Image (cartoon, rainbow, N blue to C red):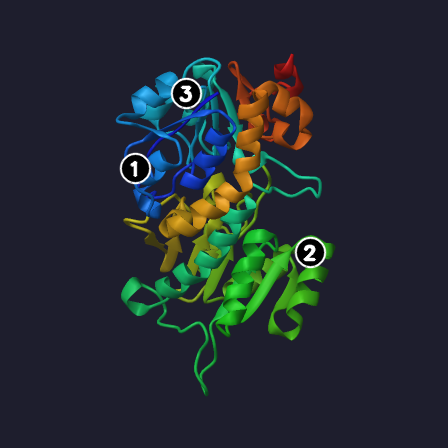
Amino acid sequence: MIVGTVKEIKNHEYRVGLTPESVYELTAHGHTVLVEAGAGLGIGASDADYAAAGAQIIATPAEIFARADMVVKVKEPQAVERAMLREGQVLFTYLHLAPDPAQTADLIQSRAVCIAYETVTDAQGGLPLLKPMSQVAGRMAIQAGATALEKAHGGRGVLLGGVPGVAPARVVVLGGGVVGFNAAEMAVGLCADVTVLDRSPSVLERLSTHFGARAKTLYSSRANLAAAVAGADLVIGAVLIPGAAAPKLVTRAMLSTMQPGAVLVDVAIDQGGCFETSHATTHADPTYIVDGIVHYAVANMPGAVARTSTYALNNATLPHTLAMANLGWREALRRDLHLRQGLNVWDGHITHAAVAEALGYAAMAPEAALG
């Protein structure tokens, strides 16, 4: 198979779909790998590194899209990239279609085979290709929130861990999954006053067992949520419904109950955000203020730590990339139910129920694509 990866063009996105090490694995299995010139510079990988791993260095993304049987990326294809997709070509990347009708329409029109990292599952019911970036984003959320709390950035002027004689910041984490757990772990490590809300008794039990007295857990009822948000210095939005739009947990009305200069960090922004007042921002201009509350909603947070993120992502994606290259995408999906859950768009149809429901399309079962 001819596998290609291109330089990411989303604002301040420095990750890359394939590392030189991943290229070496693919070429060792007899596949041809095309890498756009300069694609790996954001992770410190030169064209020479890719060439040494067996890649062909290609000057333009257009040639890669024209030649590759499968394109492996990180972020969703931008409009100019979507225009280069062709019928039957495999696109393997994050898509986050639920809040993005324009991208969805373009992918349907392309008739490409679009497999989304974020809906691939595993035997434990997890999302293994989303997990590494959720770990990064959860940890970064506390770094970003701590910075946004500084007075120079519009925040309350509160230090997360406080100092002797001065209380620490109150950090509220909405959702106890991978993002929420990692955010809580970082906040606890900085000696903040941490509360995690979730609706799953088993998640709350797991968090309570892990953190003990270092963090509090609360069932996420409406009353508990409202009270926790009102008293918070920093709120981390860490909820996820696989493939679907994120629920709007924090309403605009709730902002008036918060202290001016408090901070909201919406890690769910890729799926539309879990705060009513959220809209996507970039690393170039990461925050804005609504009703005195600082909002941080960068849609590609892990891109800021590109080397860590790219290697963590490739560790998770490479086995699936290899399987599709070795077997063809249809056979790989036939053999692997969990990879099959990643199929979002095929031959002009939506093949993931949650995506279809969020956008008002009729869903086709992914099995229909496998012949």
Q: Which mark is residue 205?
A: none
Q: Which residue is tagged 2?
A: 203
Q: Which residue occupies the foreground of this view, 335 or 123?
A: 335
Q: Position of residue 331 (x, y in %)?
A: 63, 20
Q: Which residue is tagged 1?
A: 47
Among the two numbered marks 1 and 2 on one chain, the one whose residue lies closer to the N terminus: 1
Q: Which residue occupies the foreground of this view, 317 or 120?
A: 317
Q: Which mark is residue 68?
A: 3
Q: Are marks 3 and 1 in contact (CB under 8 Å)?
A: no
Q: 10 Å neighbourhood of mark 2: few (<14), some, or many (≥20)?
A: some
Among the two numbered marks 2 and 3 on one chain, the one whose residue lies closer to the N terminus: 3
Q: Are marks 2 and 3 in contact (CB under 8 Å)?
A: no
Q: Residue at x 41, y 15 (%)?
A: 86
Q: Is residue 133 above or below residue 85?
A: below
Kind of residue at badge 1: Asp
Among the two numbered marks 3 and 1 on one chain, the one whose residue lies closer to the N terminus: 1
